[in-house]
Amino acid sequence: MKKEIKRAYLEMHVAVFLWGFTAILGKLISLEEIDLLSIIIYFHKFIIIFSCLEKYLLSS
């Protein structure tokens, strides 16, 4: 198989695994909705700030 096809299959299998794993995590999470949303927002802020900082540092 071509390298691109193998990579696509791997990405698809990882996506399916994560999709199924979210149901298990949903049962294990015992946080209220607003607390969980706050954690997700802070996590995304961290990722955005880190990626912007990385681009800034690599460009200079």
Image (spheres, rainbow, N blue to C red):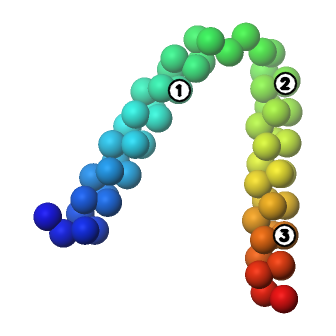
Instruction: Please report contact status of discs 2 and 3: CB closer than 8 Å, yes or no.
Output: no
Q: Label 2 amino acid?
A: Ile
Measured as percent of width and height from the top left, residue 2 is found at 18, 69
- In the picture shown, does residue 21 fall above or below 46? above
**Helix or strand or loop: what does disc 1 sit on?**
helix
- In the picture shown, does residue 31 fall above or below 20? above
Measured as percent of width and height from the top left, residue 22 is found at 53, 26
The residue under label 3 is 53
Left or right of 5, for residue 20? right
- In the picture shown, does residue 43 fall above or below 49? above
The N terminus - image quarter: bottom left
Q: Which residue is drawn at the image coordinates 23% and 63% (left, top)?
A: 5
Q: Label 3 amino acid?
A: Leu
Give whichever of 59, 31 is nearer the camera.
59
Left or right of 5, for residue 35? right
Q: Label 1 amino acid?
A: Thr
Question: Going from the N terminus, do you reach mark 1 or mark 2 first?
Answer: 1
Disc ID at residue 34 = 2
The residue under label 1 is 22
Left or right of 37, for residue 6? left
- In the picture shown, does residue 57 fall above or below 36? below
